[in-house]
Amino acid sequence: MAADLATGASDEELMRRLQGGEEAALAALMERWELPVKRFIFRLLGNVTEAEDLAQEVFCRIFTKRTHYRPGAKFSAWCYAIAANLAKNRLRWWQRHPVHSIDAWIEAGGEIADESLSGASAAQSTLRQEQILAVQKAVAALPLDLRTALILFEYEEQTTAEIAAALDCTPKAVENRLYRARQLLQRSLFPAA
């Protein structure tokens, strides 16, 4: 049933149905959005288990706060706003209850895509993995507001208007955050340039 709903209805229509009491609409939204939400949270936190847990919490919040969704609003912005707030809260909790540092999460593996280059030598593959890790470390070192905007734009392919709605700021502020994030990444990854 969720697959039937997911194929024909927009996210906004599914939210209207969920607000009307049709719980199958939540399953359809989860089917469509669970993986993008997990990826987004993982990129913010660098921890697969936490990303999975918080993704579930995002959909619990969507269900419990469904009456707060404004018809006509873009669902993706609302969903990513919930995810960003939960991730921010988790980061604050970790800062108050330190167990592992962000560096430890990244060094423990993080998300390194298995991009085995066809025909590439082991040295090329190792170099590629090192480059990916360097970028991940540089992104993880960005301030949270810059990192969130960058991840939504570059990885989740959201527009500046959608990011602005998710982060409750202006599109110009998003552009500014993206610019500052790129500048910091440039300095971090290419210090001599």
Image: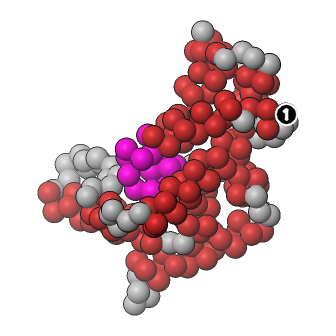
Q: Is residue 143 left or right of residue 115?
A: right
Residue 159 drawn in magenta: no
The N terminus appears in which quarter of the rendering? top right
**Who's the residue at 55% across and 25% down the image?**
31
**Who's the residue at 74% across and 32% down the image?**
66
In this view, the residue farthest toward the front is 97
Rate crowding at label 1 as few (under 14), some (14 to 19) or many (20 or more) other CA atoms within 10 Å: few
Residue 58 vs 85, above or below: the answer is above
Q: Is residue 13 visible?
A: no
Position of residue 17 measured from the top left corner of the image (x, y, whole percent): 76, 20
Q: How is the image coloured?
A: secondary structure
Q: Choose between 64 and 152: the one closer to the eye.
A: 64
**Who's the residue at 57% across and 50% down the image?**
86
Q: Choose between 149 and 27: the one closer to the eye.
A: 27
User: Which residues, given as a range, are shown in magenta?
Assistant: 39-52
Residue 92 vs 72, above or below: the answer is below
Residue 78 vs 135, above or below: the answer is above
